[in-house]
Image: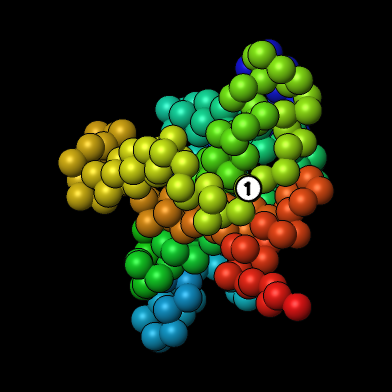
Amino acid sequence: MFNVPPVVAATIGALGLVHLVRALLLGPRADIQFLLLFAFIPARYDPSQLTQGLVPGGWGADIWTFFTYALIHGDLTHLSLNAVWLLAFGSAVARRFGAWRFLAFFAITAAAGAGAHLLTHMGEFWPMVGASAAISGFMAAAIRFIFQAGGPLGALRGDREGSYSQPAAPLSVTLRDGRVLAFLAVWFGLNMLFGLGSISLSDGELSIAWEAHIGGFLAGLLLFPWFDPVAGHTGARQDDAGAEAAPR
């Protein structure tokens, strides 16, 4: 919290700036137009004639809204909650990945979350906004290395900087760690409760895009080795893909 990586601080600053522009500079009609152009709207991809012309932006918006929706938030509470979780998990990943890999990972996991939302809400006109899918991806990436021996959770008694450079264990090994399994059980359980409507973070006007959370989380969990710059990640890639070297 007191030594936030610059890329994380800049990302939170960008999220806050977008929210300030919407709140202070855009009127109601302009804000609706902004959401139509930059929020993720599943109806945009509906091939039926009913939705043609209802969502502006053309083919460009078909692409950029997979990413830009993550920069928009419904209200200050939504933004604040995401900023807190981004500080907690994004900082750990940023220290390991570096700035450019962090930003690319943010974009890819946000797009994965949008894809999962699209598959489960095809044709829906209600816009999805928020960085939660990308933050879920950072949570998944963090559990790939923070629990292992010499990792950040043990850094209070060791080399803190070096703790972020420990080679990550293969996914098959990570998923046998009881702490990881407990984290997964709680995380997926909470999202299932969101999906069933048993718990809510709003008064009913805003719904939780839990499918997007799961899409971002799974993308972060599986794609982590492709972004991880720490030596030793090649073997993890092969293990994650299920490849085994034949004995010679």
In screen coordinates, is 172 left or right of 51? right
39 relative to 139, above or below: below
Color encoding of the figure: rainbow
Q: Residue furthest front?
A: 248
Residue in view at x 58 percent, y 44 percent: 144
Q: Is residue 45 visible?
A: yes
Point 68% across, 77% down: residue: 246
> 143 above or below 223?
above
Which element is circle 1 on? loop
Q: Residue at x 57, y 59 (%)?
A: 222
Identified at 81% across, 48% down, the residue is 231
Foreground pick, 221 / 76: 221
Q: Label 1 is placed on what type of residue? A: Ala
Spot occupied by residue 187 in the image (x, y as percentages of width and height): 37, 41
Image quadrant containing the C terminus: bottom right
Quarter of the image for residue 146 reads top right
Towards the viewer: 77 or 227: 227
Q: Which residue is mark 1?
A: 169
Quarter of the image with the N terminus is top right
Location of residue 80 in the rendering, given as x and y in whole percent from the top left corner = 50, 26
Residue 3 or 160: which is nearer the viewer? 160
Q: Is residue 91 visible?
A: no
In the image, taking residue 227 as reference, residue 80 lies left or right, namely: left
